[in-house]
Amino acid sequence: MTGPGTRVPLGRVGGPYGVRGWVRVSSGTEPPERILEYRPWLIERGGTWQPFEVLSGRLHGKGLVVQLAGCDDRDQAATFAGAEIAVPRSALAELEADEYYWADLVGLEVVTTVGEELGTVDHLIETGANDVLVVRGDRERLIPFTPGHAVVEVDMERRRLTVAWDPAF
């Protein structure tokens, strides 16, 4: 499980919580505790991805705290700090037509309806009203991910996103 597209990032380990090996987790799922439903977790450590079993987890403040199998004390928990959490692509639910996981949009080429290249999708931001594409090219652009409005077409085969967007913005 090392190729791109075989795993989808869902969060990041913050650091140790308490003295019994629990870790703080920042979740990218909605709602945040949904990350606890996915199995197995793949955690990047030392440049390699390793599967980990989640023994327990719960909401705590603005994030989550999680107990991982084999992580029994604060020193072990500290070794996970900053590690990315992903799951196998096969663990995700199938989507309806015209639905996308954020991870699928990252890296898409972004062009205007007249063919002007704006750059590629670097990441997305959740704003509450709608998600926003962060497009990096000659400069950074923030484009609302509003299919049928700003987003005219998402072509996953060509890895291209067409937008009705003035390049001056």
Image: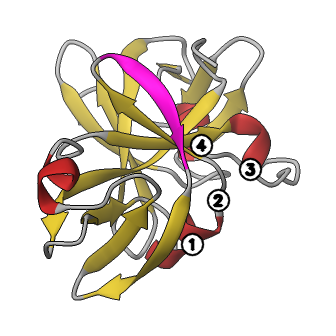
Q: Which residues are magenta?
A: 47-52
Q: Which mark is residue 87?
A: 4
Q: Which element type, helix, strand or loop, lies under badge 3? A: loop
Whether 43 is drawn above or below 23: the answer is above
* Residue designated by label 2: 38
- The answer to whether the residue labelled 2 contacts the one labelled 1, judged by CB atoms less than 8 Å apart, is yes
Neighbour class for label 2 at 10 Å: few (<14), some, many (≥20)? some
Pointers 1 and 3 in contact (C-beta within 8 Å): no
To which residue does mark 1 refer?
Answer: 34
In the image, is residue 50 part of the stretch drawn in magenta? Answer: yes
Going by the numbered disc 1, the residue's amino acid type is Arg
Residue drawn 27% across the image and 40% down it: 83
Distance between the alpha carbons at the discs numbered 2 and 4: 7 Å
Q: Nearer the viewer, residue 147 or 42?
A: 42
Q: CA distance from mark 2 to mark 3?
A: 8 Å
Q: Amino acid at mark 2?
A: Tyr
Q: Say above or below: 77 vs 124.
A: below
Mark 4 Cα-neighbour bin, 10 Å: few <14, some 14–19, many ≥20: many
Label 1 SS: helix
SS at mark 4 in the image = strand
Q: CA distance from mark 1 to mark 3?
A: 11 Å
Task: Identify the mark nearer the N-term, 4 or 1.
Answer: 1
Is the residue under label 3 in contact with that under label 4 (CB below 8 Å)? yes
Sequence-wise first label, 2 or 3: 2
Which sits earlier in the primary sequence, circle 1 or circle 3? 1
Residue sitting at x 79%, y 39%: 90
**CB contact under 8 Å: marks 2 and 3:** yes
